Amino acid sequence: MSPITEQRAGVFGLQVGIAGCGKVGTSLALALTQAGVAVSAVYSRTLNRAEQLATLVNAAIYHPQKSELSLPKVDVWIVAVNDDNISEVVHLLHQGFPESLIAHTSGGCDTIQLQPLHPRVGVFYPLQTFSEFRLLDWSEIPVFVSSMHESDTAVLHALASTITMKAVEIKEEDRAIIHLAAVFINNFVNAMSAIALDILKQKKLDFYLLMPLLDETVEKIRLSDPLNAQTGPAMRGDLQTIERHLGLLNQFPSEYKEVYQTVSALITKYLRKDP
Amino acid sequence: MSPITEQRAGVFGLQVGIAGCGKVGTSLALALTQAGVAVSAVYSRTLNRAEQLATLVNAAIYHPQKSELSLPKVDVWIVAVNDDNISEVVHLLHQGFPESLIAHTSGGCDTIQLQPLHPRVGVFYPLQTFSEFRLLDWSEIPVFVSSMHESDTAVLHALASTITMKAVEIKEEDRAIIHLAAVFINNFVNAMSAIALDILKQKKLDFYLLMPLLDETVEKIRLSDPLNAQTGPAMRGDLQTIERHLGLLNQFPSEYKEVYQTVSALITKYLRKDP
């Protein structure tokens, strides 16, 4: 039997636990269940949420305080909680499951700092922004996996492959870089939109008239290189328009102007073809 | 006959000229022609481009130097050239067409400064980013119109309505605000993507793994208010992650770090729900 077949066969025999019943944990539990992977246990600090998700995917609830009760079998725990709480949850899971593989879903968490808490730790990082009440197609979501042991990485890779076509093994330092890039793509793109919305809102203009422009901006990024697709007053070196915009920005929070100036300076310095 | 019917009837009798055969002018000439509006004349500083577009839409070419030749009838000229060249082109068109309505397509151009050049000037501003070799669906593109005379505005509104469902009359000061917001939505969103691309490229990581995240970021903006949808380390007040990212950014151009700090400061100050 080839190693790949063994891994695949192993995944469907695996029992997975989900720790954290927020947007990521819930979405992941549903996607795994739908893919035929057994979610055998659920943990949440909020018992109510654990109960809801456990019912949904037919799993047991793990109570760290009641570990004398019979525990479900869990081969892989996936910890989908805020970065600040990962250590605490790994510590709790270690008590009941000292031999399980425990992987967190964070882009930013430093996995090495978890090693003193548990011998088998890893990463199962889905590169996506999750919302409540919104079903996502996992098949296109990249899931970055890594661990300290090759065999554990293979298990996480195979597990990710049950729900996505884009399971990718990644080095710790590269995950940090991807998370950094994701902040620009997700958080900062949203912030630019929030500024635009607020500017229009204050003038009683309709933000949604800008949606076709945002859609086309993204299409251009998809079809060509954003480094070459840059346009706008800073790109053209159109100082008159920039001055007019800075004047208009005086009526808004001063941070909007600072963002305008800083991003324009970047465009002028790095993205202009003929500076 | 109601005024609306008169306007509509009038539009289809109108002869339109397109000055500037770049991305906007070409796309507009094709959309108008497809909508059944007669494009009777084309002007470009580059004769070659004028010839190409004139052939495509079956129009005459306007040569300012040869204005002794018989001129085509043009009721409305649309001037789709760079902001810096609008005055010059309006001046040229005025010589051959002293009575035509002349509207520019710029978000930023101050229309009032064109009035000394020509008695009937106006705005026909499509809020979109145009690319060569990419056909756009004009029906969803907002076109903002205005002029000094109500009747001219009505003509421009009716003309816009032949190609889009979103023809909008706009005050001069509001157009400037929309253009400012468009810089954030288009130019700055592209700049955030360009930074992300460059960071990944330098580390030999695949930018296109980020596309589902960018798509979902935009879907969230479409479905909810970006002012309420903000996430990320700055939003959470996660100083540890911010510090780590600033450290990583030291290996890239210093402007990337400045953008990260400026946008994070904005998020922390304006977008956090519980600062």
Image: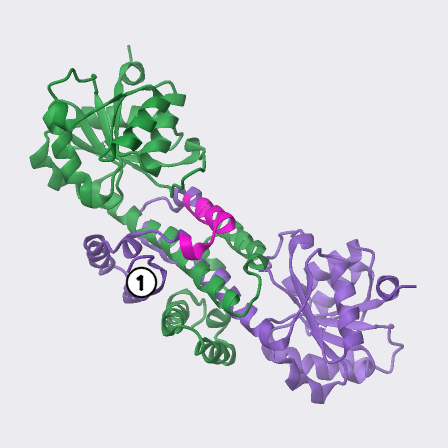
Chain colours: A green, B purple
Chain under label 1?
B
**Camera-side residue: A109 or B234?**
B234
Taking A58 as reference, is A207 left or right?
right
- Residue B203 visible in the shown view: no
Residue drawn where x is 44% and y is 35% of the image: A136
Q: Is residue B40 magenta?
A: no
Residue A234 against residue B35 in the figure, above or below: below
Q: Which residues are magenta?
A: B213-228
Q: Is residue B224 magenta?
A: yes
Residue A226 locus on image (x, y percent): 45, 56
Residue drawn where x is 36% and y is 71% of the image: A255
**Camera-side residue: A274 or A39?**
A39
Taking B133 as reference, is B188 left or right?
left
Q: Residue furthest bottom?
A: B116
- Residue B210 visible in the shown view: yes
Residue B53 locus on image (x, y percent): 74, 62
Residue receiving disc 1 = B256
Residue B79 against residue A23 in the figure, above or below: below
Taking B102 as reference, is B236 left or right?
left
Locate the N terminus of chain B and report the quarter of the image it occupies: bottom right
Residue drawn where x is 62% and y is 76% of the image: B172
Q: Quadrant of residue B112?
A: bottom right
Q: Residue furthest top?
A: A1
Q: Quadrant of residue A13?
A: top left
